[in-house]
Structure formats: structure tokens, C-alpha cells
Image: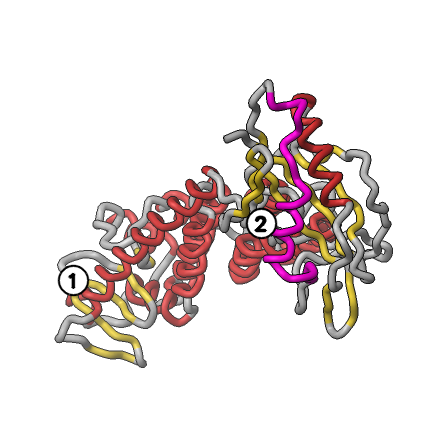
């Protein structure tokens, strides 16, 4: 599950990378460098926050995954365990958006596959040629265009589409689609996808300008002629796009190679610093913060010891185990947890999220409460008391070595 701090860290890194592209890189013509830079911009902000910091003495490891145990409900003197790990409305909205985005992608993909299954298919240099009524675009190793264009592979428009195929731009398109399915709500992810598509057109335009007898002016006139052609499918690379003006500017742009390389050299240390910050942003990506609980961590007095670890894991090869397993933990909580008598008159319902670390020796340490309020102090105190008094666990193992592992346990207090 994505946590809000993880999402904020990724957004800040994505925003910095994309801003650097808009301000520094997009107006010069080192287009292949820009292509890979934009692909990295799309992917790295969501990977880097999960990586341990390479700096010496870096703190607790960060991660996207939070090991959240099943919720326990305290009703008066009874305690029950539910099988739901705290999936809330935000997660449901996110998953619903993903499903709808995936459905739209599948519909477009199905429509495209049907177009590709036409019987009268020609081939040139391994590229499939499929005639259309007017639309001009490419996808994978297939070019769709009117028959007159398909018969002239040296035509600038055909050279443009052939460049899309030869440079394998479809792979970038599919990566962008995947990113916008997962992050369907994120405007910067959509903006990065559009920047990638625009750079594809600049690359293909540069290749088309190598056609014999074509000039920048005549090619610009050709783009204007095709500007009103329909866009058959959003998944394809279309010769006619809404970026005609920007493409014409790029066609007529000349650059100083030395200046372009200098800009990139100056940009590298800034990007390296941002990457290190994202890796080491323990305060920005707290792996124990539940996606539905986005308030400050509040420490409460507890009998369990507080230990400073060099590294705390979220997921390991062999996870720690309570004595008797899940059933043993349910029995322990059922016997120990009670609804605070001082809160019965108020008849409040509250969920207390308790984080704790199982040490290398299997002891419960660093017991803390998330989302505590003054009205819920009695609930927090009861949860802390019971968790801190837990018997020793079997410690977690990573590569044959006992390691500390962090958990989050939601405990719901409500009267019947």
C-alpha cells in the first residue's frame, strides 16, 4: 500500500526532475539523452525512496511496504480479530481508479489489435504496413497510413513513422500507460508521459529531415497540411498531433553542442543530491505510517525498551512469529485487552495504531502510538500496556541472520 509520505517524497523528486527538463533540457536537441532522462523521471521517483541511503551512518531503511497486522476489535470485555488489514476509503478510491484506468487501456488495446488483424498486410524491412482511410500512426512494428503513402517508403511522413518503429518508441508509450494506470490521479505523471510522447515526435522529425530533398521549411509545411488529420488511437505515435507549433520550433532550432553538454554537467550534481535526499528521507517516508492515518507520531510511555537500531526492516525472508502464531496472538490479545472503564460513559469508538519493533533477540521494543488524540489517551495507554507486555517472539531472519523488524498493529475500541 502507498503511504502519503512516500507519495509526497516521490512527487517532490518527480517535480524537481520534470522542472529541470522543462527549464534546462527540452529546448535543445540532444533528443536521445532527453528520451532516457524522461524515462528515468517517470520511474526513479517511485523507486529511489525505497532504497537504503548510500551515505555512511544512514538511519532506518525506508520502504513502500508497511507490514500491518490484522485489526483487533475490543468490544467491552471481548476482543475479536478481523481479517481486514485496515483498507480504508482512500485505498478503495485508488484501486477503483486503477481498475477504471486499466479498463480504458484494455479497450484501446483491443481496438488496436483488431485494426492490426486486417488481411491485406504488406511488409517492408520487417515493418508491417496496414492501409487506413486517412489516419497516419505507428505502433510496435506496424505503420498505419493511406495506401498512397505506404507505396512510398521514402516519403518524409513515412520516414517519420519508420523512425518511431526503429527507435522502439512503443515501449516508452506502454511504460507511460502503466505509470498513469497506477498513478491515475497524479498530474505530474501524466505530464511526464506527455513530455515523453512529444520527445518521440522530435526524434522522428529529426529522422524524417534526413530524407533526400526535404528542407526544414517544406517539412514544416507538410506538418501543417496533416495537422487536421484524425487521431485514430491514443496508443499510437501519430504524425498529426496537437504539438505542431512546438515541433516546428524544434525543427528550426540549432544548438551549441558544448552549451548543451555543459547544462547537463551542471545538472548532474543537483540531481545526485536530490536522489541522496530521497533515499535518506526517513522523516519523509515513514514506512510505519498507514495510508489512512496521516497524523504525527506521538510517543507514549511504555514498559518496552527503546533501542536505537542501525537498520530496521519492513519485510524479511523469514518474518518474526508470535508464540503460537496468529492464533496465539489472538488469544493473547483476547485475554489482555479491555475497553477502558473510564471511556464507557463516553461510548467512543477509536482505532489505535501501535508500531513496534521485534529485536534480533525477539523482544518487543520501541512501542509507539500513531494517531493519538487527547480524547483517546485511555485507549492508547491500554494498547501500549498490552503490546509492551507481549512475550518474546521468534526473531525475523534475513540471509540467515536475525534482524529487527517493524510492525503496525491496529486495535479498534468500540462498545457493543
Residue for point 60% across, 50% down:
68
Where residue 244 sits in the image (x, y, percent)? 35, 46
386 sits left or right of 218 in the view: right
Residue 354 in the image: above or below residue 155 = above
Mark 2 residue element: helix
Residue at numbered disc 1: 132
Q: Nearer the viewer, residue 99 or 264?
A: 99
Give residue 146's quadrant in the image.
bottom left
Pointer 1 with pointer 2, Cβ within 8 A: no
Mark 1 residue element: loop
Give residue 320's quadrant in the image.
bottom right
140 sits left or right of 226 in the view: right
Where residue 299 sits in the image (x, y, percent)? 77, 35
222 sits left or right of 175 in the view: left
Can see residue 16? no
Where residue 247 sits in the image (x, y, percent)? 40, 49
161 sits left or right of 8 in the view: left
Residue for point 85% across, 46% down:
306
Residue range in magenta is 320-344
Between disc 1 and disc 2, whose residue precedes? Answer: 2
Residue at numbered disc 2: 25
Magenta stretch: includes residue 169: no
Amino acid at each position: 500500500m502507498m503511504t502519503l509520505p512516500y507519495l509526497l517524497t516521490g512527487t517532490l523528486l518527480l517535480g524537481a526532475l520534470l522542472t529541470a527538463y522543462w527549464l534546462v533540457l527540452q529546448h535543445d536537441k540532444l533528443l536521445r539523452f532527453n528520451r532516457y532522462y524522461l524515462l528515468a523521471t517517470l520511474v526513479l521517483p517511485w523507486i529511489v525512496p525505497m532504497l537504503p541511503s548510500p551515505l555512511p551512518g544512514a538511519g532506518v531503511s525506508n520502504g513502500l511496504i508497511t507490514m500491518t497486522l490484522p485489526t483487533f476489535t475490543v468490544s467491552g470485555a471481548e476482543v475479536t480479530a478481523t481479517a481486514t488489514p485496515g483498507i480504508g476509503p482512500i485505498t478503495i478510491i485508488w484501486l477503483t481508479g486503477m481498475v477504471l484506468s486499466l479498463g480504458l487501456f484494455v479497450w484501446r488495446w483491443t481496438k488496436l489489435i483488431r485494426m492490426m488483424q486486417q488481411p491485406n498486410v504488406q511488409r517492408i524491412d520487417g515493418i508491417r504496413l496496414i492501409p487506413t482511410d486517412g489516419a497516419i500512426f505507428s505502433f510496435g512494428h506496424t505503420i498505419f497510413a493511406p495506401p498512397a503513402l505506404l507505396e512510398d517508403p521514402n516519403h518524409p511522413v513515412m520516414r517519420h513513422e519508420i523512425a518511431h518503429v526503429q527507435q522502439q518508441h512503443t515501449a516508452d508509450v506502454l511504460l507511460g500507460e502503466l505509470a498513469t494506470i497506477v498513478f491515475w490521479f497524479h498530474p505530474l505523471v501524466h505530464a511526464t508521459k506527455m513530455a515523453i510522447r512529444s520527445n518521440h515526435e522530435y526524434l522522428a522529425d529529426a529522422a524524417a529531415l534526413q530524407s533526400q530533398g526535404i528542407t526544414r521549411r517544406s517539412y514544416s509545411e507538410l506538418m501543417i497540411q496533416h495537422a487536421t488529420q484524425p487521431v485514430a488511437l491514443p496508443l499510437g505515435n501519430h504524425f498529426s498531433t496537437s504539438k505542431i507549433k512546438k515541433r516546428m520550433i524544434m525543427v528550426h532550432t540549432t544548438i551549441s553542442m558544448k552549451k548543451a553538454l555543459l547544462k547537463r554537467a551542471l545538472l548532474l550534481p543537483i540531481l545526485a543530491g536530490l536522489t541522496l535526499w530521497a533515499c535518506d528521507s526517513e522523516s519523509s517516508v515513514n514506512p510505519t505510517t498507514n495510508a489512512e492515518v496521516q497524523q504525527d507520531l506521538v510517543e507514549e510511555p511504555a514498559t518496552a525498551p527503546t533501542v536505537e537500531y542501525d537498520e530496521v526492516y519492513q519485510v524479511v525472508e523469514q518474518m518474526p512469529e508470535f508464540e503460537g502464531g496468529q492464533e496465539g496472538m489472538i488469544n493473547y490479545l483476547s485475554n489482555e485487552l479491555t475497553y477502558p472503564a473510564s471511556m464507557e460513559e463516553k461510548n467512543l469508538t477509536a482505532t489505535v495504531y501501535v508500531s513496534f519493533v521485534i529485536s534480533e533477540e525477539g523482544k518487543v521494543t520501541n512501542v509507539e502510538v500513531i494517531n493519538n488524540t487527547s480524547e483517546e489517551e485511555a485507549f492508547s495507554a491500554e494498547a501500549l500496556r498490552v503490546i509492551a507486555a507481549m512475550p518474546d517472539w521468534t526473531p525475523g531472519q534475513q540471509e540467515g541472520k536475525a534482524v529487527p523488524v517493524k510492525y503496525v498493529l491496529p486495535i479498534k475500541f468500540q462498545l457493543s
